[in-house]
Amino acid sequence: MNKEQYNFHEEEEIDEIIQRYEEMLKSGETFYFDVFQIEMIIDSYIEEGNLYPALKVVETGLEQHPGSINILIKKASILLNLGETNSALSLINSLLLIEGTSPDLYLMKGTAHLVLGDLNEAKDNFAKTLKYSFGNNEENYYNIGYAYEQANHFKKALSYFLKAFALNEKNEMVLYEIAYCYEKTGDNYKSIEFYNKYLDIDSFSDNAWFNLGILYNKLEKHKKAIEAYEFAVAINDDFASAWFNLGNSYMLRKNFSKAIDAFTEFLRFDDSSDEICCIIGDCHINNRDHEKAFEFYQRAVTFNKKNDRAWFGSALAMKLINDYHAAYKYLKKAVNIDYDNSEYWLFMAKICRKLNLRSETETAYERVCELNPGKLTGWLKLSEHLHHNGMISKAISILETSLFYHPANAVLHYRLSAYYFESMNEKNAVKHLKKALLVDADKQNYLFDILPEARLNETIVKLIDKYGNKS
């Protein structure tokens, strides 16, 4: 029973009763409250989520009215909400010996069994809730549906919410829960339909607009998601999650300036979020404002020095303004934090190559191959680096190793063929050229780019004529 059910009381009277009760607690005196007043105080505390103070009111009520079934029912409900399921069930069973036709008790008993995983007992007790209600079951269908929903049985919950909907298509709470359950069961279009029905009645529900935004993003309708999130924050300017999701949606639309605005709003609620600072930095990178990006990445590391993404972003920003020494310094910090990130090592190899750090370039490319052997780029770049620096035998060895992970890759075979021809190993050169031509004859320029003189090699020409069908 909530405040609305006490429509015969003025709101001021309820406040006065609560104030009188709280004065009693402070003074240590004992004031008398009738059962209805005790129930009002309990309901007020429950509405505000103050379950333990509500339980204390129950004890006060039972001291003054030890035989009150209504107060004991309130106690059972509070115990159930506090997760003390077995205690609640024990009390409910004892109350049913007195009130054997109470729909409220059967509803709570069904909910308790649902929490305990006994679905058959839950079903039987919910049936008794409906049996003893003697009237319009709209509220009972809603309550049973909500019990199933809280236990994550969304399809079952939906079946009861739809029964309530059939009785009253304008019940806002029912519409909202139907939309939520459809969302949870993956029927996004149905969910959108019911959120819109709900919004037709209550267009100022920031939560409904927020949930619509999530659904539209799932369906990759990012423009409509943005509209939904914009409504949410227009209604509730302090809706942090909506500002965050709005920023993400703008990023998906590649509107990075608007994304920055939204994420900046989010910082009002968590101004020391290193992750959001990194995201804003990423947006500035995409807007080619590299100095501003660097500022936000550095702001991130002031909040969290172990944020490797922030150090990597700082390195990227420095690289984009051609400050390779600074990029190298920041990148070292990133890889020291996340030593197993192949993307960091690939970037490290590029920076080291720019700085002519041959040994470190080789080590970085080797690390890429070790961490992500399925990525072709690492093998190609490492072999290219070794070949460029005169280590052709080592380059060949690397490419032969790469074939274990990419056995049918034409580019690798063309490159191996070129390197073997350079090494005067015509047998292996021919072997790999045949394989390359059979896999993809159209890529034969990969051979000629490395070994232009191959066009004049009689053996190569014959192989291409035989296997390539193209010059």
Image (tube, grey):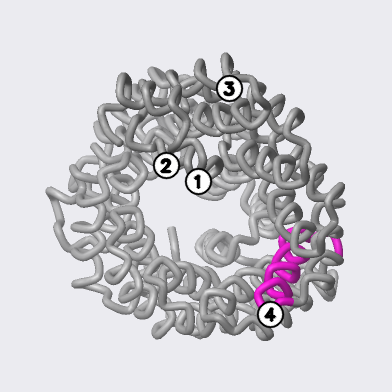
Could you tell me the amino acid type at mark 1? Answer: Asp
For the residue carrying disc 3, how many other residues have a C-alpha within 10 Å: few (<14), some (14-19), or many (20+)?
Answer: some
Residue 439 in view of the camera: no
Could you tell me the amino acid type at mark 3? Answer: Leu
In the image, 160: left or right of 64? left
**Mark 3 or mark 2: which comes first in sequence?**
3
Could you tell me the amino acid type at mark 2? Answer: Asn
Q: Report the mark closest to the observer, 4 or 3.
A: 3
Q: Secondary structure at mark 4?
A: loop
For label 1, the residue is 449
Q: Report the mark closest to the observer, 3 or 1.
A: 1
Q: CA distance from mark 1 to mark 2?
A: 6 Å
**Mark 4 or mark 1: which comes first in sequence?**
4
Span colored in magenta: 305-322
Q: Which quarter of the figure is the N terminus placed in? A: bottom left
**Mark 2 or mark 4: which comes first in sequence?**
4
For label 2, the residue is 445
Q: Secondary structure at mark 3?
A: loop
Q: Residue at x 65, y 35 (%)?
A: 372
Image spot of residue 250 (x, y percent):
42, 73
